[in-house]
Amino acid sequence: MEHPILFLDVILSKFGVHIPPHVTYSWVIMAILIGLGVMATRRISLVPAGGQNVFELIVGGLEEFMVEITGEEGRAFFPYIATVFVYIALCNLIGLVPGFLSPTANINTTLSLALCTFVYTHYLGVKYHGVKYIKHFLGPIPALAPLFFPIEIIGHFARVLSLTLRLFGNIMGEDLVMAILLFLAGAFLAPLPMMFLGVFTSLVQAFVFTLLSMMYFAGSMEHAH
């Protein structure tokens, strides 16, 4: 998807520097998150207020939801889940601002996130079960292991493809629709109803990605039956 005007591209072009937009806007998101984190934790108090209150609301709500799904063992991977949710949500939302790009509208970003989930899933499996983690891939009875093993391997790699394309396709389509509406309407307020839908879609896609990651992590931590 080609964007006619991206603010960071215009600024970098003045210095003769060309960096892929999804990389530069990923850096912007990381800088925003670091800045918000510093602001929220600069004056931590027992009675939360301001930025601390907002962060505690988001983090606390997400943690309670995750523990309901995965149980207490899920707290082991909560930092990853919380980070990925906030990062993806901001990546999705920033594309709604004219002149900015959603890093998740580029398949390289979504693939990197999916690979992180894939690697961490099997890291947790090995951490909790050791060599016995291989039982997750061998099926219910030893006689069927030669059949189940390749099926399970394909299924686990298919998770990477599913996470990658679902997030990428939805956000790229959303940005494309917004760009078309903005171009046809010629005004910022005309596609405003679509922008509200875009905010909803952005949050839903971040939630879906993290929910699937939770389920994969919980599955790798369970004992094979």
Image (cartoon, rainbow, N blue to C red):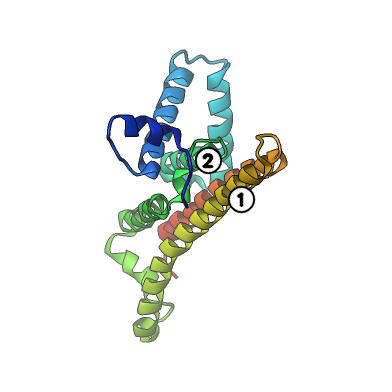
Q: Earlier in the sequence, mark 1 or mark 2?
A: 2
**Label 1: few (<14), some (14–19) or many (≥20) C-alpha neighbours in 10 Å:** some
Q: Nearer the viewer, residue 117 or 142?
A: 117
In depth, the one of 182 and 125 nearer the eye is 182
Q: In the current view of this chain or complex, which residue is farthest to the bottom?
A: 143
> Which amino acid does the dot numbered 1 rest on?
Val
The kind of secondary structure element at disc 2 is loop
Whole-percent x and y of residue 193? 72, 41
Q: Position of residue 99 (x, y in %)?
A: 50, 35
The quarter in which the C terminus is drawn is bottom left
Taking 28 as reference, is 21 above or below it?
below
Q: Residue at x 45, y 37 (%)?
A: 6
The amino acid marked with disc number 2 is Gly
Residue ID for mark 1: 177
- Residue, disc 2: 95
How would you rate the neighbour count of disc 2 (Cα within 10 Å): few for under 14, some for 14-19, many for 20 or more? many
- Say whether residue 74 is left or right of residue 185: left
User: Residue at coordinates 56% horizontally, 35% vertically from top-left?
Assistant: 97
Name the element at disc 1.
helix
What whole-number distance in Å separates the C-alpha atoms at marks 1 and 2?
11 Å
Residue 36 lies, in percent from the top left, at 46, 24
- One can see residue 69 in this view: no
Circle count: 2
Residue visible at 40% across and 27% down in the picture: 34
Disc marking residue 104: none
